[in-house]
Amino acid sequence: MSAESLSPQRRGLLDPITQSPVWQRFRQSAIYRYLLFPIGQIVIFATFAIVLLTVVAYIIAILYPEPRPNINLLTQLNIQLPGMIISGISIGFVYAMIALGYTLVYGVLKFINFAHSEVFMVGAVVGFAFLNFLLSLGVIEVWNPIALVIATVIISAIVCGLLAVIIERLAYRPLRRAPRLVPLITAIGISFILQDLVRAIASFTINDFNLSYPTRNLDFFKNPIPMTFGDNEVRVRVTSIIIIIAAIIMLVILNYFVNGTKSGRGIRAISMDQSTAGLMGIPVNLMISLTFFIGGAFGGAAGALFGLNVGTVTPYVGFVPGLKAFTAAVLGGIGNITGALLGGLLIGMIEAYLNGLLVYFPAIGIRYTDIITFGILIAVLIFRPSGLLGERVDEKV
Amino acid sequence: MKKFLALAGSAALVAALGVSAVSAQDDNVIRIASQSPLSGGQSVLGVSISNGVRLAIEQLSGPLTDLGYIVEYVPFDDQATPEVGVSNAQQIVADPTILAVIGHLNSGVAIPSSEVYNDNDLVMISPANTNPLVTDRGLPTVNRVCGRDDLQGPTGANYAAELGATSVYILHDTTAYGQGVAEFFQSEAEAIGLTVLGFEGTEEASNFDAIVQPILALSPDLIYFGGIYNQTAPFISQARSAGYEGLFMGPDGFDSSEFASIAGDAGVGTYYTSVAGPASIYPNAAQFIEDYTAEFGEGPQPFSAQAYDATAIALAAIAAAAEEAGAVPARADVAAAVRATENYEGLTGNITFDDNGDPEIGLYYVLQVGSADPDEWSNNELLATLEIPSPLMAAAMAEATPSS
């Protein structure tokens, strides 16, 4: 999320403003670089995804006004639009947060950490374990729900960050000089080990591996918030709002860390050229561990938020979101942090719109959602092999 | 628990010793096998089926022991997987002393496995398989003591109409079971004049946010979900918290205490149909529940009483065939004797098999989840019991009516 990438050095209509000293000073200020810029970027991406898909949806609604008898697609679309947007953005942020883990690791080590989907799963399970522990203490209904969410997300993030560091130390570091395929295989191995380990722990401790978040019975999380959009009253899930807010806060923190701290600069240096960065005195191993910690923490936080949203998680819950997030990372351009955000939001929105609209086309139906989503991915990759925001393949990302 | 483990361990040891001891004198040993998932996500039901069989053999093999035979039980774990079920089936048919199989839990496993049994004339009695194809193939060795999905789905649709629902939205899990029962629900719903607002299959197992949106927009009176509790319970919990206010209904895939623990408060009030009610609803089953609890330390799950009945029918048929033959009967004779079962008064009702091996009159139940506490699952309220004749029986009755 470098500030340079969004401000092309071309001459344009806004040049008198962008070249003015006031603007230049403003651009250098911390408020702009670490708060306004990343939030603006998120808003722009989300708006882009919403506008793009809404336009496509309305074109379809105009082309097929009555796909099924007694169904007016335009009316249905008007009713559903706010719900689809919110569910799409919330799951999109979850994908984006997982995708960051894939993309950060790819950026520094140039390999796909396929165990990351299971780190996400561990995050969801740790969130459950923590909330269940609070339940057994009897304090879950006493605590402020917001404090509950913050504590759960932070604990999951820390545990998963450490887990990712341990995985890197045990399974990837010894193989750093081996061919790329080798750590890929250990990553797949690690993901199986994590799945079965969590399953074994769950079976031995509570003899059940459908892990249900106790929060799903709390009034704060259970009851939707009524909102009015135009003529329609829409009910919005509290957990969707929580995901969106939490994700924005965490992405702002990530932007500050990567662009505003010495460690962040170290990570960026390593992703450009590892050996030269090492010669310049950057502690390569420490920076790689740090990268894994951040990626794992984001995955774990996403897991806890996902768990709060869906209510029940299992040791196998990581696979599908992990795959979608990997897709998002590739769609956005793997290795590119901004790309992961854009890719995640797009995949989440596409999924939400397809699930919302295919219902009215009985010949297709929502079971084809994934096929169409991945079809779009293939189409994009044919024209932009390095992803939407990815740079050319022969350059280091 | 320790005591139970020790008991189970010593029982296994004794069984192992017993097997090696009797293998020398095979000519008066009769074995009954069971196949159900003893490990994995559905093992709660599978183990309970196996326990039901064990209890029946312990209690009801009297007539055969009087004739001088030793009755033994061999449980197999089909892992709810077709390949494992078929490979177990091949092992089972290779043992000439096995005269009957009680199983399976999953129709998808029972159908291929029963082909193997049938090729070897080995009789199978199913306690739980509801897919119509299990018996509709007309195999002489395949029977079941429970109802069928093509009658269970319509039972749900009729009850939905009775509840006052006028529009329904149907979801299924895309499996043979879930989609099958949902389609039967749909065709009956359309036939009785309910508006079907949607019919969708999804493999999504955890995040239903996006799937719920069109349902909220269509706002049906009732959502029917043809699927198993580990998928349907999270859906119900999320649909409620997204603001859906109508009713939920499902097939017997909902019937597990896990449903209550996953769905939480949102699951209370959910309707489900079943071919096998909790054992407590059967008037004859009080003694069974007591014995089962005393022996296994917990109450029976759904299908356990059915497994007990299936075993009882197998034992009675083997005894009849043995008496007639004066020796260990041939498998084909046992199969014929099972099919000839008439008016067997079991725990779960009166069973007479029709020519396809379905009970002539099947019992179908409509229940409602009463509590979010999984321990209260067996106290779910029974709202209706319907006696519906099997398709063969219904055809025979339809033929008889105009001629008379």
Image (cartoon, coloured by chain):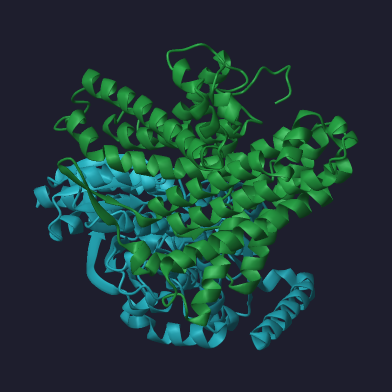
Q: Nearer the viewer, residue A109 or B201?
A: A109
Screen quadrant of the N terminus of chain A? top right
Residue furthest top in the image: A11
In the visual, does B143 lie left or right of B188?
right
Query: Is B60 drawn above or below residue B84 in the view shown?
Result: below
Shown colour of chain B: cyan
Q: Quadrant of the C terminus of chain A?
A: top right
Task: Return the residue found at the far front.
Answer: A21
Report x, y in % for residue B285: 38, 81
Which residue is at a point 51% across and 62% down the rendered structure image? A150
Give A323 or B339, whichever is nearer the viewer: A323
Q: Give the quadrant of residue B214.
A: top left
B55 shown above or below A131: below
Whether residue B74 appears in this view of the structure is: no
Q: How many marks?
A: 0
Image coordinates of residue B174 in percent, x first then y, are 42, 42
Residue A298 visible in image: yes
A315 relative to A76, above or below: below
Horizontal and vertical percent position of residue A173: 85, 44
Side (left or right) of A375 relative to A276: left
Residue drawn at (38%, 32%) of the image:
A47
Is residue B342 rendered to the left or right of residue A158? Answer: left
- Closer to the camera, B173 or A370? A370
Quadrant for residue B32, please give it.
bottom right
Palette colour of chain A: green
Q: Where does residue A211 sit, x and y in percent of width and height?
A: 52, 64
Name the residue at 88% across, 45% down.
Answer: A174
